Amino acid sequence: MTFPFHLLAPPDPAALPLPHPARPADGVRLLRGAVYAVPDGSRPLTVDLWLPEDATDPVPVIVFVHGGAWRTGLRDDLGPRFRSWRPGPFARLARAGFAVACPDYRLSGEAAHPAQRDDLAAVLDWLRTRADDLGVDAGRTVLWGESAGGHLAALTALTQPAGTIAGCVTWYAPADLPALAEDRPEGTYDPHDADSFEALLLGGAPADRPEAARDASPVTHVGPQAPPFLILHGTDDVLVPARQSVRLAEALRDAGHHPELRLISGGNHLWVGLSDESAEDCHTRTADFARRCTGGGAGRTR
């Protein structure tokens, strides 16, 4: 008797039941840990969905991509400046009329570039497939990420088919990996170091994998079909130089776009050094930009 090996295949994430909703704040439904993809040889990838509770029409989507040097991080963590917020930053956006999707992706210890970009493309496909179930308008999607997540958000936004992404927000994100050696202070970055975070992402030292470093750089993929961008970066960032965001803005302008670049005086990585009011303003600017790009969202993000 032969065994029906097709039964060992994982279930189709598009057909799996959605998680039971929680209510972490007034007016908010949270579907935590929905499976959106099962890459071969990898763990299942999951996404949290923060949804307005009483929406009567499909709502626009913000896909938040967490940071952590491509090596670590939690899908629902916006960073230390926002962990004490009650309600939290994603609940605030849901109360303002957005759906917020916070996906896992394969980290550099699990797979090298372009796996992370592929995972984000997969969550976008899943959102389109499950749009009716979720009550979202996946045609009005903004990508947003901080640090390494901002890099992945930009890379994904610039490599999706034209018209797929309504806008992209990056916070203190790398944008041009081959230029890091020039942009970082002398002696703080070695492109030949096979143990750097960038090398672990690329599967080898950037100097030894120049084509991979270029392909993993958002600036490489800027073209005439790029979506609108909001680019926020602190002037005092000691981990990712603000020059990286300037390079992305310059590439977008050279392609005929009008990105909004904000260099925030005194801001270090993770918005260290900013007042609470200035950090909150970064969140507010992000929500306002998403509202302009999607024609959606309403009310205050408080």
Image: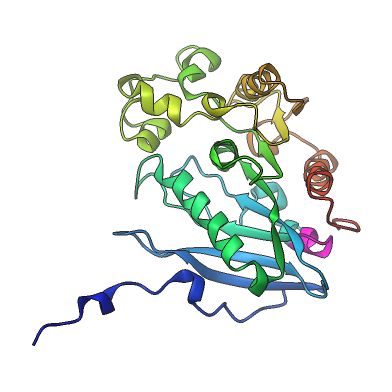
Residue 128 drawn above or below residue 267: below
Tell which of 255 and 28 is nearer to you.
Answer: 255
Residue 83 drawn above or below residue 177: below
Residue 75 appears in the picture as rendered:
no
With 295 as the anchor, is 14 left or right in this view?
Answer: left
The type of colouring in the image is rainbow
The image shows residue 274 at horizontal and vertical percentages of 77, 35
Number of disc labels: 0
Residue 132 drawn above or below residue 231: below
Residue 266 appears in the picture as rendered:
yes
The image shows residue 7 at horizontal and vertical percentages of 27, 79
Can you say which quadrant of the picture contains the N terminus? bottom left
Membership of 169 in magenta stretch: no
Membership of 94 in magenta stretch: yes
Which stretch appears magenta? 91-98
The image shows residue 36 at horizontal and vertical percentages of 49, 64
Residue depicted at 11% across the width and 83% down the height: 2
Q: Is the magenta stretch mostly helix, strand or loop?
A: helix
Residue depicted at 44% across the width and 24% down the height: 214
Q: Residue furthest left?
A: 1
With 204 as the anchor, is 101 left or right in this view?
Answer: right
The image shows residue 247 at horizontal and vertical percentages of 62, 19
